[in-house]
Image (cartoon, helix red, strand yellow):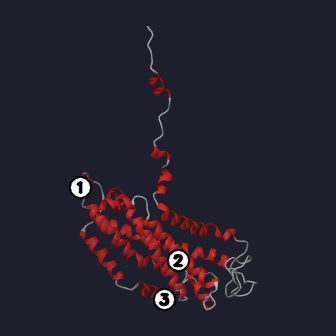
Amino acid sequence: METSTSPTAVSATALPAPVPQERRAGPLRWLAGFGPSGLLGLAVLLFWLLATLLGPWLLSHSAAAMGTSNVFAPVSAKHWLGTDYLGRDMLALIIEGARYTVGVALLATLLASGTGTVLALLAAASGRWIDAVLSRGLDTLTAIPSKMFALIMVAGFGSSVPMLVVTAAIIYVPGAYRMARSLAVNINALDYVTVARTRGEGTLYIMLREILPNILGPMLADLGLRFVYVVLLLASLSFLGLGIQPPAADWGSLVRENIGALAMGGASVIVPALAIASLTIAVNLVIDNLPGRAARERGAR
């Protein structure tokens, strides 16, 4: 006896299951969540990161070499951003300076946020006395003005790159700790953390598996803001002559070295300042337009 199969059943079994729209357009949907201003900030930030990593290898000559052009030369086809007070090409100086401005600031920010987050997790998951000791100890650092602490460290130990990284990290560890602790304490009081303790999980498990995943998003946003603070701190130290030392140069020291061109509106002093501004604005645009943040803010209202 023949059995008839409907065309609908045949097509349903023969054709593969459609790929969900969310899976097909995952990265594109994630990028679209930034919005126009967020994408602009992301593009500028990506440009400076690529300049930090690949820029020096793409240059045909070293920016530290003595220039052969006129000092404070205007923008031209030969020198797209003009020249500095020694006749060196400003474009090459900006690209090489990104290694110090972006690289040193990023390293110091990761060190500060990582240390502050680990200490906050330990304080929230451990007993009260550990929380009290860590909080009061870091409060003493908060009481010292950041610029004053940086000047003391540089005057006492010099202004080498490792010392600048350590100094900036120490200054911003308390802020990262306070932010992470405020989040971690609230998470630590929830029921699923109590259940994990009841079934015998240790402190390290509570820190890494129960608390950390739930504070990671806000801490990444805080890391971006802290990166901006570190960039401005290092730029101000370099402008005072206490940051990156010659022959190396970051954007802050480029502004200080070429301050003589300010009266004539030279590009050699304007361009490094614009580079600092573009980096900080780009980071803020990315943070303000993180995917899902606008939806969470609408839900909170």
Label pair 3/1, CB-CB below 8 angstroms: no
- Mark 3 or 2 closer to N-term? 3
Q: Residues within 10 Å of mark 2 (few under 14, many from 20)?
A: few
Where 137 sits versus 152, above or below? Answer: above
Label pair 3/2, CB-CB below 8 angstroms: no
> Mark on residue 277?
2
Where 140 sits versus 180, above or below? Answer: below
Residue in view at x 50 percent, y 45 percent? 24
- Closer to the camera in the image, 39 or 148: 39
- Mark 3 or 1 closer to N-term? 3
* 48 horizontally vs 86: left or right: left
Q: Position of residue 209 (x, y in %)?
A: 35, 56
* 222 horizontally vs 63: left or right: left
> Mark on residue 156?
3
- Name the residue carrying label 1: 191
- Marks 3 and 2 sit apart, C-alpha to C-alpha, by 30 Å
Three-letter code for the amino acid on which mark 3 is drawn: Gly
